[in-house]
Image: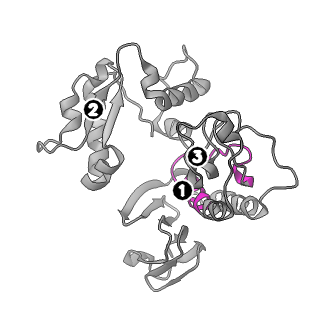
Amino acid sequence: MGFLRDFNTSQSVIDIFEMLYVKLGRKLFEKIFPVILTDRGSEFSNPRMIEYTKDGILRTKVYYCDAGCPHQKGSIEVNHELIRRVLPKGVTFDNLTQENVDVMMNHIGTHDTERAITKIAGESCEYRDRTWQSCHSLSDEQKNNGIRLLKCAAALQYTLPGVPSVYYGDEAGMQGYKDPFNRGCYPWGNENTDLVEFYKELGSLRNSHSAFKDGVFIPVSYMLGCVAYRRRNADEDVMVIVNRNDHHISYCVPEEFENATLLMGNNITNREVSIGGYSFAILQKRI
């Protein structure tokens, strides 16, 4: 996530976390932000207002890096580097909009991260040396689960605000741990054709529905491993439901989506949508 601020003040940061708390709700906010690690910039000079709600409820804990030690929040620094590739130092931010910032943030994998399918389904490589990383790949079971989970992640990527940016080979099922194992040659002739066709279908779906380009984002629910949201503009109203569980669920959609058109997924009967484990459904409201 990235947020454009008009002024570099502590209040501007407090306002963003307050907005996130209201939109996400207490349970989800605390799950996503159990702790906040930051540097000692003036914009984080009022940690208590970030840590506590207006009602005095503790919702997170703020921690600071040691002075001159940005490596203590290494993954965050990588995000800064990625942003600077789009907006180099010296380039003004004055003409940016929040929509511009949303576009910069919409990716799953990059050349600075483990391959998406490996990160999603593989064994953790933390504290593992390069020798270990070079000779480990997904088992057949991990690979099958990884493909299903990657499809869920891609469905989110292609339907959330912003323009999806796919790191070459992710759409073909390429595996690999950290650099240099995440930067192998494209597997010409050995692509996972099922994944390739799936990404093509997602691209076609996104191009065919303007709500994914400029529709507002409306959270619907998040609980028990299932997330649902809507994208709506003047022309259409689309709902996305993703099931992170390994088992089947039946999801009851809002009344206005009864017998909606199923764009991707299994089936819908009245208001009940059937969604398999590690799967999703995308519906279009009848207008």
Q: How many marks?
A: 3
Q: Does the magenta run of residues contain 24?
A: no
Between disc 3 and disc 2, whose residue precedes? 2
Residue 157 screen position, x and y as percent? 56, 52
Element carrying mark 2? strand
Give amino acid for label 3.
Ile
Query: In this rendering, would 80 be left or right of 252?
Result: right
Mark number displayed over residue 62? 2
What residue is drawn where x is 56% and y is 25%?
Answer: 81
Label 3: which residue? 108
What residue is drawn where x is 30% and y is 43%?
Answer: 34
Element carrying mark 1? helix
Q: For mark 2, does the 10 Å Cα neighbourhood hold few (<14), some (14 to 19), or many (20 or more) residues?
A: some
User: Furthest residue to the left?
Assistant: 55
User: Furthest residue to the bottom?
Assistant: 269
Mark number displayed over residue 255? none
Q: CA distance from mark 3 to mark 1?
A: 10 Å
Q: CA distance from mark 1 to mark 2?
A: 29 Å
Is residue 134 placed above or below 212 in the rendered structure?
above
Between disc 1 and disc 2, whose residue precedes? 2
Residue 66 screen position, x and y as percent? 34, 18
Q: CA distance from mark 3 to mark 2?
A: 26 Å
What residue is drawn where x is 22% and y is 37%?
Answer: 51
Instruction: Classify the position of the N terminus by image quarter.
Output: top left
Between disc 3 and disc 1, whose residue precedes? 3
Label 1: which residue? 156
Tell me, yes or no, if residue 241 can be seen here.
no
Element carrying mark 3? loop
Q: Nearer the viewer, mark 3 or mark 2?
A: 2
